[in-house]
Image (cartoon, grey):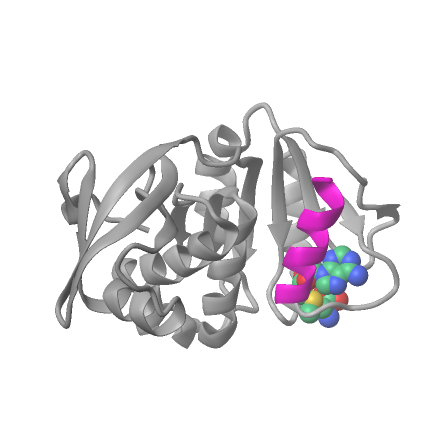
Amino acid sequence: LLEPGDLLDAQTACLTGRRLRHVQEIHRAEVGQTLRLGLINGLMGEGTLEEQSPDRLLFSLRLDQPPPPRLPLTLLLALPRPKMLKRILQTVATMGVQRLVLMNSYRVEKSFWDSPFLQPAAIREELLLGLEQGRDTVLPEVLLEKRFKPFAEDRLPALADGSRRLVAHPVAETACPVGLNAPVTLAIGPEGGFIPYEVDLLVRQGFEPVHLGPRILRVETAVTALLGRLFV
Ligand code: SAM
């Protein structure tokens, strides 16, 4: 994926740093070879490697294809442990999630909020890896909400406006719908689960508790399973 600063003009890009190493080591590209490229938050297409040196690669570009459509999904995720967070960030970008809210919850370990992986640059790096995997260019919006109650009461109603609201809860009586394919706001709890107070507050905000069957899934597995089930 190209940063706007990589463009020398609309038809030429110069790659350095991590992306240069990626092209050289993963793709083993040679002059004359064509690769799929895209501009972050912009069009996708192809680039032909025109010049190669140890510290820069020059591509001629033909970027004329729109990125794939987003999933109309706002995912509210209780902040997971840093290692899991990295994988989930990649997954949500690969799957085209529109917005991710990393929120606090009673059972989120407080030290997770101090993780260097929550720095905007670190989040962006994982999202870019996910986008490259999914052949997409559009970065999901990521919001951090460090206090559950003010978020759920004050800001969530506007964020969830016009969407179906679901909270993934293993003891729910209703099964998660299949193939909803409509705007959804989906809440997923921490490793220890939501406490009843949090589920009640979400229910008061119009969220329906839904389950995914009798197995308790790890958070990252629940994310993938829920997305695969809601959007087919
Ligand atoms: N003991 C916790 C509980 O009972 O809620 C398990 C939490 S689970 C490891 C983490 C989160 O993944 C849950 O809060 C829920 O949002 C989601 N989840 C995992 N398995 C699920 C299932 N079978 N049905 C619905 N949600 C599930």
- Work out whether residue 205 or residue 143 is closer to the camera in this orientation and state it: 143
**x and y percentages locating residue 181 in the rendered image:** 70, 32
Percent x, y for residue 64? 37, 30
The quarter of the rendering in which ligand 1 is drawn is bottom right
The residue under the point 72% across, 56% down is 225
Whether residue 84 sits left or right of residue 120 in the image: it is right
Quarter of the picture containing the C terminus is: top right
Residue displayed at 81% across by 40% down: 177
Q: Quadrant of residue 60?
A: top left
- Is residue 87 among the parts visible in the rendering? yes
Q: Tell me residue 204's x, y (percent).
A: 66, 37
Evaluate whether residue 195 shows in this view: no
Question: Does residue 115 lie above or below 223 as drawn?
Answer: below
Left or right: where does residue 164 sit relative to residue 36?
Answer: right
- Left or right: where does residue 185 sit relative to residue 215? left
Q: Residue 153 at x, y = what percent?
A: 50, 39
The magenta segment is 220-232
195 in relation to 114, above or below: above
Instruction: Examine the rendered structure and indicate whether residue 231 appears above or below residue 34.
Output: above
Q: Using the image as rendered, state which of residue 26 and residue 69 is in the foreground.
A: 26
Q: Residue furthest front?
A: 32
Residue farthest to the top, as pictured: 162
Main secondary-structure element of the magenta-colored stretch? helix
Residue 165 colored in magenta in the image: no
> On the picture, is 131 further left or further right than 227?
left
